[in-house]
Amino acid sequence: MNSSVLIFDSGVGGLSILTEVRQRLPHLSLHYLMDNEAFPYGLKPDDELIPRVLKVCTLAVKALQPDLLIIACNTASTLTLPQLREQLSIPVVGVVPAIKVAAAQAAETTGTPDSWRPGGHIGLLATPATINRTYTDNLIRDFAGHCTVRRFGSTELVQWAEDWINEQRTPYGLFEHLNSWLQHPVPLSHVVLGCTHFPLLKAQLQQQWPAITWVDSGNAIARRVADLLPQTVSSTTLATAINPARNGDLQCFWTDSHKEPTGAIRYLSTLGPVSRCAVLPEK
């Protein structure tokens, strides 16, 4: 029987993480869970989000019995990872902005840790909550001290990503929203997509600003899953490469009984047959 992974987010953002896991480990069974009843997380206070995330995730783990849980949301990860790891008996993987990766790449670009050369300027594009967290300050201090880091908090990109997945609506206004920040006072060479929603718009971002390297956490999360479930990276991986019909199961769950996430289900179906779509079972 294939190992299974539960991937959790408030909306469609975690689909960017699921896609990377699917590409690296196609034999895994993947359960995608959206807390769409409480979307968006980025506008809610911490004291409301923490018990909510803990409740939904523990309920889902009990109901679905995954081998590993991914909190595919920067806000939820920074708030609840220690508690979830204490409460659950399975590995829990969180998502944080890929500042370390972008800073290392920027240093390689310049060949020097001189923060005032063009390659030494990196951007953090995330939700307002993420760019203002102490956790983010610490990441920048620990891994990007040789860079100048500019931050931009956007709720618009979250909604544009939702619209793109749910309604296939092009994010008009993207250039006007970001270009001034990206180019002034000096052009950014690397930008961290610090919200899992944002990589869903990477094609549009690359088209508008091809000179910028867009960095996200998806590939690193997929590698971490492979490390934590080493028994899955074996002959089963080779078997699925030879016979894609042996790919793992795909399922979609959500919390709002009045709002089926048709866009997320449609997106999942591009990765393979979706065997189950349902409101999160409470038992």
Image (tube, rainbow, N blue to C red):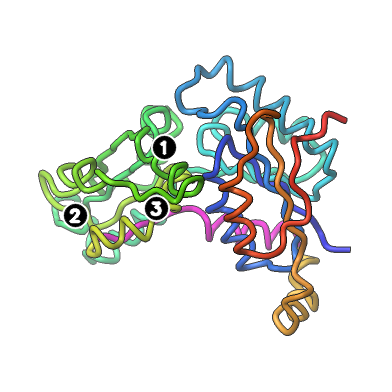
User: What is the spatial separation of the Cα atoms under label 1 and label 3, in whole angstroms?
Assistant: 11 Å
Pointer 2 residue: 114
Residue beneath the point at 64% across and 63% down: 22
The number of discs equals: 3
- The image shows residue 110 at horizontal and vertical percentages of 21, 64
- Position of 74 relative to 263 (above/below): above
Q: Are marks 1 and 3 in contact (CB under 8 Å)?
A: no
The answer to which quarter of the image holds residue 95 is: top right
- The numbered disc on residue 201 is 3
Residue beneath the point at 29% across and 37% down: 152
Mark 1 or 3, nearer chain start: 1
Q: How crowded is mark 3: few (under 14 residues within 10 Å), some or many (20 or more)?
A: many
- The image shows residue 227 at horizontal and vertical percentages of 68, 61
Return the residue nearer the eye: 100 or 208.
Answer: 208
Q: Give the range drawn in magenta.
A: 212-229
The answer to which quarter of the image holds residue 2 is: bottom right
What's under tag 3, amino acid-wise?
A: Leu
What's under tag 2, amino acid-wise?
A: Asp
Q: Do the residues labelled 2 and 1 touch (CB within 8 Å)?
A: no
Pointer 1 residue: 159
User: What is the spatial separation of the Cα atoms under label 2 and label 1, in whole angstroms?
Assistant: 36 Å
- Position of 146 relative to 73 (above/below): below
